[in-house]
Image (cartoon, rainbow, N blue to C red):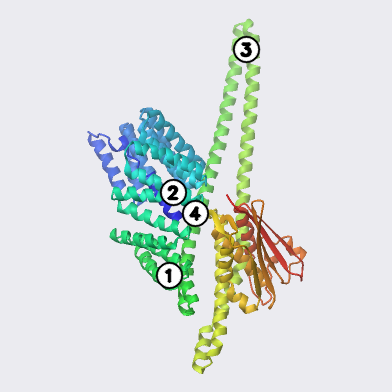
């Protein structure tokens, strides 16, 4: 949650742009009043109906053009751009804002030029195009520095810092924030001084420098108290609590969490309470205080429902399921796990639909753009040919008129023809390259569809299999209860637990793979203790280990650290342990070890299982139906696990490999950096 909070605070810093002259236009005539009424209505209905807002803004733009009023046209372009950004039409928004920059330049209006460059940077940032976002923000900074607008310089530095943070360049981000901080202090702007200090603390935390991050947050807490900004103070308090938790100072962490709750209650901030209660639940679970963990998970769930924070609801359901499973309250654990899965599937379906629509829109836009370029190229060729014909005709006329100039004209015609031929050749080559690019795009989309079809065919029966195995269990349980044979319920409960774990693992793998294919994954690398992650993953697989009476040995030093995304590492280790259990016969063993050498941490998962044949070993990391094998007890799988392991290790700058011999066990080992 600390990283999420810092992200929110960073965003607050750059959304304080004034509207400048666009919002201060004088409209003496009825025509101008009519246009401003249209724009006013467009602004009012923007949040509720972006489509209707766009219609009104477009009509305002048309009337502004008829009136030949440049300032009103700029204002109309802004309204159109805002509506299109609400509709996720970012490319068209950028085109409108570019036009506004051109018009503002014609008026020599520097404040407007700065503002629209800043807006263009924000739209590129929303698209995830951080390279172009950085270019726009740097142009805005250049304009502000040229005009010596200190406030705009500070805002541009903060915006650039956000982009650098998203690109994980935390040190440079801090450098730009320090420049911004110096200006805010010169301007005696206490609120922005406080926000900038918070942003610096956020980047320090992402670098793992918790001591300096805490020092800055405590300073920000003092400033927020002085300016009596309770909302800002509540956010700072939660961040301080999270930092103390990372530093294992649980007494101070608990104190600040409770202080944060009091502040959020005073603000009647239901959403903020949901977030902090969820943080507190995780905090107490990490300290094995299941009673308080359950209490705050329930509070987080109630407040998340009131504020419609679905991610917090999902986290609360998962925490409650974990707590109840530890307390042997399996019915409650099952209910909460089902709620978590349903909500997670719902969010995934929405996200996938949005992302597929975005991919389709990008492809169509690129296709249209290429077609336009091809047509432009053809028109340019025709124009060149016409020019060439005119030139030859004029040369002949000049030769008839005066013989002395004949040689000069012929020489010039030859030289011009040569230049034109070179230009024609370049244009033809460009058109051919564009055709090749279009063809490659089609091949790439076909490959994605092919992979999707193979994947669905593989998992179709594996999703049905665990659910089918659970059909009729409720009837069996009632029958056993009525007959008094309750001693058999433990075995059924174990079967249900194992089936749910396999189903949850299957869905997690499917979700992670899908996100990786549509670039929906965000890597948040940090320094973590690897043994803690291994123990967490082993705890999830505990029932499966006990069911097959497999001996598990862990040989990892407590202080061994790696620099990695914790959730990705959990997924990798969980899949490797799951595979080892799956292919290891009863009474076998699994050894998990780790060692550090030359800045790398090498982790090994070795089992005494049935091993892998040489033919399957060559394609073990690929998605195909031929590599899928049942476990020693008939366990099923999708074949996604090792593919995810390979992708996640690569994303974290690591390597993974497998050593195996049929019938003699398998060893999977991977290496990750020990520091940034």
Cα distance between the residues tagged 3 and 2: 72 Å
Front position among marks 2 and 4: 2
Q: Nearer the viewer, residue 578 or 606?
A: 606
Q: Residue at x 36, y 27 (%)?
A: 108
Q: Nearer the viewer, residue 345 or 99?
A: 345
Residue wearing tag 4: 357
Q: Is residue 248 above or below residue 381?
A: below
Q: Quadrant of residue 403?
A: top right
Q: Secondary structure at mark 3?
A: helix
Front position among marks 4 and 1: 1
Cα distance between the residues tagged 2 and 4: 37 Å
Q: Earlier in the sequence, mark 3 or mark 2?
A: 2
Front position among marks 3 and 1: 1
Q: Earlier in the sequence, mark 4 or mark 1?
A: 1
Q: Earlier in the sequence, mark 3 or mark 1?
A: 1
Q: Earlier in the sequence, mark 3 or mark 4?
A: 4
**Crowd band around label 4 with a 10 angstrom C-alpha radius: few (<14), some (14–19), many (20+):** few
**Crowd band around label 1 with a 10 angstrom C-alpha radius: few (<14), some (14–19), many (20+):** many
Residue wearing tag 2: 201
Front position among marks 3 and 2: 2
Q: Secondary structure at mark 2?
A: helix
- Asked whether the viewer can see residue 640, the reply is no
Cα distance between the residues tagged 4 and 1: 40 Å
Q: Is residue 388 above or below residue 134?
A: above
Cα distance between the residues tagged 2 and 1: 28 Å
Q: Residue furthest bottom?
A: 483
CB-based contact (under 8 Å), mark 3 and mark 1: no
Residue wearing tag 1: 293
Image coordinates of residue 213 in percent, x first then y, are: 45, 50
Q: Horizontal placement of 291 versus 439: left or right? A: left
Q: Residue at x 57, y 33 (%)?
A: 377
Residue wearing tag 3: 409
């Amino acid at each position: 949650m600390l990283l999420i909070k810092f992200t929110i605070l960073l965003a607050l810093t750059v959304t304080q742009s004034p509207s400048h002259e666009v919002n201060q236009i004088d409209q003496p005539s009825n025509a101008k009043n009519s246009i401003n009424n249209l724009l006013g209505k467009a602004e009012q209905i923007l949040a509720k109906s972006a489509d209707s807002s766009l219609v009104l803004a477009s009509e305002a733009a048309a009337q502004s053009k008829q009136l030949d009023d440049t300032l009103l046209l700029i204002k109309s372009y802004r309204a159109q751009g805002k509506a299109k950004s609400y509709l996720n039409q970012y490319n068209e928004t950028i085109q409108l804002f570019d036009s506004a920059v051109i018009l503002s330049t014609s008026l020599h209006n520097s404040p407007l030029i700065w503002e629209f460059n800043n807006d263009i940077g924000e739209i590129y940032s929303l698209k995830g195009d951080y390279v172009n976002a950085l270019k726009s923000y740097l142009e805005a900074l250049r304009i502000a520095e040229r005009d010596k607008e200190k406030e705009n310089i500070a805002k541009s530095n903060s915006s650039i810092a956000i982009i650098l943070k998203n690109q994980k360049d935390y040190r440079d981000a801090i450098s730009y924030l320090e420049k911004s901080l110096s200006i805010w202090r010169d301007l005696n702007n206490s609120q922005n001084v406080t926000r900038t200090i918070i942003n610096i603390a956020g980047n320090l935390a992402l670098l793992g420098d918790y001591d300096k991050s805490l020092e800055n947050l405590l300073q920000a807490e003092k400033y927020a108290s002085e300016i009596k900004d309770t909302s800002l103070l509540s956010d700072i308090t939660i961040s301080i609590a999270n930092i103390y938790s990372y530093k294992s100072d649980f007494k101070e962490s608990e104190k600040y969490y409770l202080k944060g709750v009091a502040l959020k209650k005073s603000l009647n901030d239901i959403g903020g309470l949901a977030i902090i209660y969820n943080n507190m639940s995780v905090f107490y679970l990490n300290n094995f205080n299941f009673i308080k963990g359950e209490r705050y998970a329930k509070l987080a769930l109630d407040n998340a429902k009131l504020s419609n924070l679905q991610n917090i609801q999902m986290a609360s359901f998962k925490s409650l399921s974990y707590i109840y499973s530890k307390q042997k309250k399996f019915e409650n654990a099952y209910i909460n796990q089902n709620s978590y899965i349903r909500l997670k599937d719902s969010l995934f379906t929405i996200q996938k639909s949005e992302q597929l629509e975005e991919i389709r829109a990008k492809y169509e836009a690129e296709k249209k753009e290429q077609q336009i370029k091809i047509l432009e190229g053809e028109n340019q060729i025709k124009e060149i040919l016409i020019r060439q014909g005119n030139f030859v005709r004029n040369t002949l006329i000049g030769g008839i008129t005066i013989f002395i100039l004949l040689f000069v004209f012929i020489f010039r015609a030859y030289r011009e023809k040569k230049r034109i031929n070179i230009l024609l050749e370049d244009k033809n080559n460009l058109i051919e390259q564009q055709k090749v690019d279009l063809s490659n795009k089609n091949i790439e989309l076909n490959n994605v569809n092919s992979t999707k079809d193979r994947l669905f065919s593989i998992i179709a029966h594996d999703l049905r299999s665990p659910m089918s195995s659970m059909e009729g269990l409720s009837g069996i349980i009632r029958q056993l209860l009525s007959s008094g044979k309750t001693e058999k319920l433990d075995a059924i409960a174990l079967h249900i637990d194992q089936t749910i774990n396999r189903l949850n693992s299957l869905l997690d793998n499917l979700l992670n793979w899908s996100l990786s294919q549509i670039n929906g994954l965000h890597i948040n690398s940090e320094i973590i203790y690897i043994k803690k992650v291994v123990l967490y993953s082993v705890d999830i697989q505990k029932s499966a280990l006990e069911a097959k009476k497999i001996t598990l040995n862990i040989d990892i030093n407590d202080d061994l650290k790696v620099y990695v995304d914790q959730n990705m590492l959990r997924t990798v280790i969980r899949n490797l342990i799951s595979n080892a259990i799956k292919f290891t016969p009863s009474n076998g063993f699994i050894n998990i070890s780790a060692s550090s050498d030359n800045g790398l941490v090498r982790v090994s998962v070795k089992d005494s299982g049935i091993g892998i044949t040489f033919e399957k070993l060559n394609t073990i990391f690929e998605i195909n139906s031929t590599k899928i094998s049942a476990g020693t007890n008939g366990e099923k799988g999708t074949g996604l696990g090792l593919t995810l392991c390979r992708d996640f290790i690569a994303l974290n700058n690591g390597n993974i490999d497998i050593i195996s011999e049929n019938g003699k066990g398998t060893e999977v080992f991977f290496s990750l950096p020990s520091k940034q």
